[in-house]
Amino acid sequence: MGGPGSDSDCSLAKPGFTSGDSSLVSVNTGCLHVNSSTKKGRRLQLCQMISLPFIPILALVAQTLIILLGAISSQREAATIENQVDLTVEVGRLLSALQQERLEIAMHIFQGKDRQTNPRLELSSYFGKTDDAIRNTTAAFTSKYDSWNSIFGSKVNFMDHLSLLSMKRLSVLELNEKTDREDDEAIKEIEWYNIANDLILDQLSTRIRDTSSTHAWRNLIAYKYIIKSIENFSISIVYGLYYFGRGRLTAYSYARFVRFDSLAYDYLNASQQFSPLIFRDYANFMKTFQHTQNMSITRGHIYNNVNISGNKEGAGIYYEYMIAFIDELRTYQERLRDVILLAVQEDLQDATQKQTLSVGILILVIMISPVIVSLITNATQTIQAFSQVLVEKGTEIKRERRRCDRLLSQMLPAPVIKALKERRKVPAETFDSVTVYFSDIVGFTNISSKSTPLEIINFLNSLYKLFDAKIVTYDVYKVETIGDAYMVVSGLPHRNGIRHAGEIATLSIDLVQSLKKFKIPHMPGEQLQIRIGLNSGSCVAGVVGTKMPRYCLFGDTINVASRMESNSEPMKIHISQTTKWLLDKLGGYMCEYRGTTEVKGKGPMDTFWLIEKEGGIRKNLEIELPGYMDADEEPDYFYDLAD
């Protein structure tokens, strides 16, 4: 391609070209790289500026909604837990009544014959208490929970089981009056109560959640465990009464005692792990309870299942202090219920406060959003107006800089311009191998004498436009034009091996062929002819001058090339021996020996005519384009200087 300093750079931008002016300076803003210099870009920028502040606002709204939904969920959960704990109070009374009735029946079975009172009359009072508890629970469920289905749902097993209560009571009483009954048979009759209580406990455990977002979840677990502990202690007491009443447990009853006693203590220990309240109060109770040692000893006896004679008095004492122990556990149950309800109330208050705060934040965001939109719109419009002024000024500066660079490129190569812009020195540089082209117009003095100055300028401009259009297709650099003289070089400022000889040779052939169709604008009947001279060798290139710096070549190679041109003939290409050698190395060029030529300052030299290139050269269609021979067309650099 042509060197960056060639005059042809001006012809790359056609006269009146302004399409690039709007893109000289573009302000791309935002993550979408919106060009704010256009109307559409300003609209997009305004939308972007308005939307960006709302991203954190939307995040705040989303967070607030999450908090609000969480508060509503916590409120519902706390209300559910409160309802569940309240439900256990009603069911707990029934559960206690069934447990007490079971213990009293066990006492009558294993020492009823030694009592002075009528077993039927004494048990009837406990049966009445249980019936009252059933009626009260049923009434409470009717007013608060609609029915027993609040606990048992679609399961009717408990109601069916409860309907057998009267029949089971009668069966136990009749069994107690038999003299030939088996104790294990009586125990199995009592297990009806175990099944009833298990049904209640299973459903309570299902209804009361083990985990919860409230602060009461640990106490809820402890609450469930203490209820189960009481139930298992109550069952184990039945087998303890069996042991004291009969002196020894059967294998079946022994296994049942071990199971329920172990479960009772496991649930009690687990409840202490989840509730510091139970842990502390239970430890204090066991220190002050007067039967603590008796409980431990009795438990050991039963576990050992040592055969003793029936001890009715011991059974009564065992019954009394175990009832006291269970009553103490029931106080823990009541305290835990109060703690849970207090925690639930705190959670309800906290949820209400969060809801109030969240609603307040949402209302505030809705109120200030229009204000934010208005402020951002005004600020964005102000910024856009200011940026538009900057874009216009930047466009003018960019355009002027482009003009300056293009004018500089007419005088200096691009590497030299870059070095000067970077305030670096540009030392002279030696090039070992270049090819220099010189040409001038044959009979230029005669043409000038017949033409006006303006016609000469238009004529040379048309000619050099043709030359400039040609050199852009070759790896050459236009050095200068002086009058009718035209100087081109290849191999600098970018070195290209020995290709420079081929580039200049092909260019010379192309120019000679193109001039055969060239017409002098004001003298169309005259055929324009030029002389061309080529020489290859070394030279030195550098910037000369400070006021109007020029890129100049120095060396004997330039002088010989000038002599080749002055000793040439019209429409012929005169080359030196050194150029001939390089073309022979490249191959593909036909040369003819001219003979020995007397060269001023050098003496006789063998020179040659360059005839043609094998295979011809590519036809250049630019000569056929309109404008190259238009005498009225102004030079390209006029447009660079125009405002």
Image: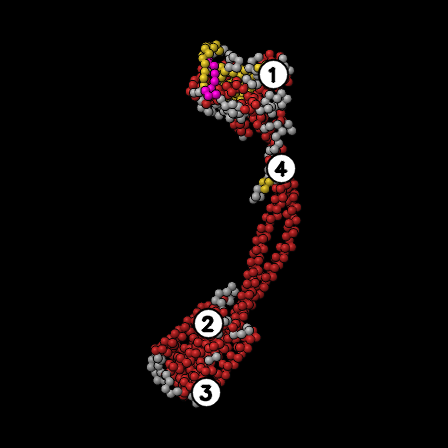
Residue 524 numbered tag:
1
Residues packed near mark 3 inside 10 Å, few (<14), some (14 to 19) or many (20 plus): some
Residue at label 4? 391
Label 4 is placed on what type of residue? Answer: Val
Disc nearest the viewer among 1 and 2: 1
Label 2 is placed on what type of residue? Answer: Asp
Q: Is residue 55 visible?
A: yes
> How far is disc 2 from disc 3 in space, using C-alphas?
32 Å
Kind of element beneath mark 4: helix
Kind of element beneath mark 1: strand
- Most extreme residue toward the bottom is 116
Which region shows up in magenta?
Answer: 607-616
Mark 3 vs mark 1: which is more N-terminal?
A: 3
Kind of element beneath mark 2: helix
How are the colours assigned in the image? Answer: secondary structure
In this rendering, the answer to whether 182 lies above or below 431 is below
Label 3 is placed on what type of residue? Answer: Arg
Q: Report the predominant secondary structure element of the magenta stretch.
A: strand
> How far is disc 1 from disc 4 in space, using C-alphas?
49 Å
Q: Is residue 638 magenta?
A: no
Label 1 is placed on what type of residue? Answer: Pro
Image location (x, y in percent) of residue 472:
53, 25
Residue at label 3? 120
Disc nearest the viewer among 3 and 1: 1
Mark 1 vs mark 4: which is more N-terminal?
A: 4
Disc nearest the viewer among 4 and 2: 2
- Image quadrant holding the C terminus, namely top right
Place residue 170 in its image quadrant.
bottom left
Q: Is residue 324 visible?
A: no
Residue at label 2? 202
Kind of element beneath mark 3: helix
